[in-house]
Amino acid sequence: MWYIFLFLVAGVFVGFLFRRKENLLLIATKTTTLAVIVLIFFLGVSVGDNRAVMSMLGTLGWQALVFSFGSIFGSILLSGAVYLLFFRGIHEK
């Protein structure tokens, strides 16, 4: 588990060193988006392959739906609050 933290710290360090390199940031943003999409796809594959989850889908479906929408709505609200508190003035230059 510690190696995940080391990669995070290394990424922060590299990002800090190359923060003025717009090409690197553009590549990092696109790569991150692609990686998240691939991870979501393989999560779907894992769920679809799990017989226990698929057999309980009728029972767990509504709970999962409510939990998913609550998570998405909460993430949107928190992201908006963080943007307003910390990043609102950055794009106004």
Image: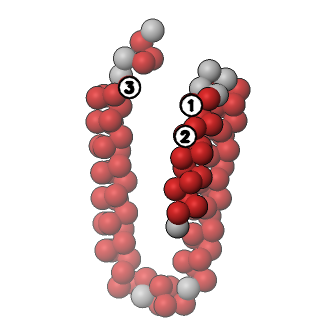
Proximity of marks 2 and 1: CB atoms separated by less than 8 Å: yes
Question: How many marks do you count on the picture?
Answer: 3
SS at circle 3: helix
User: Does residue 35 appear to the left or right of 2 in the view shown?
Assistant: right
Counting from the top left corner in percent of width and height, residue 44 is at 57, 70
Does label 1 or label 3 sit earlier along the sequence? Answer: 1
Q: Which quadrant: the C terminus?
A: top left
Taking the spot 37% from the left edge, 54% from the top edge, the residue there is 72
Spatial CA span between label 2 and label 1: 6 Å
Q: Which mark is residue 12?
A: 2
Is residue 61 among the parts visible in the rendering? yes
Proximity of marks 3 and 2: CB atoms separated by less than 8 Å: no
Q: Mark 1 points at which residue?
A: 16
SS at circle 2: helix
Q: Based on the displayed image, in which of its 4 quarters is residue 23 positioned?
A: top right
Taking the spot 38% from the left edge, 77% from the top edge, the residue there is 61
Viewer-proximal residue among 6 and 24: 6
Q: Is residue 9 above or below residue 45?
A: above
Q: Tell me the amino acid under the disc marked 3.
A: Phe
Q: Which mark is residue 87?
A: 3
Outermost residue, top side? 93
Counting from the top left corner in percent of width and height, residue 10 is at 59, 45
SS at circle 1: helix
Q: Tell me the amino acid under the disc marked 2.
A: Val
Q: In this view, does 64 lie above or below 25?
A: below
Taking the spot 29% from the left edge, 36% from the top edge, the residue there is 81
Q: Tell me the amino acid under the disc marked 1.
A: Phe
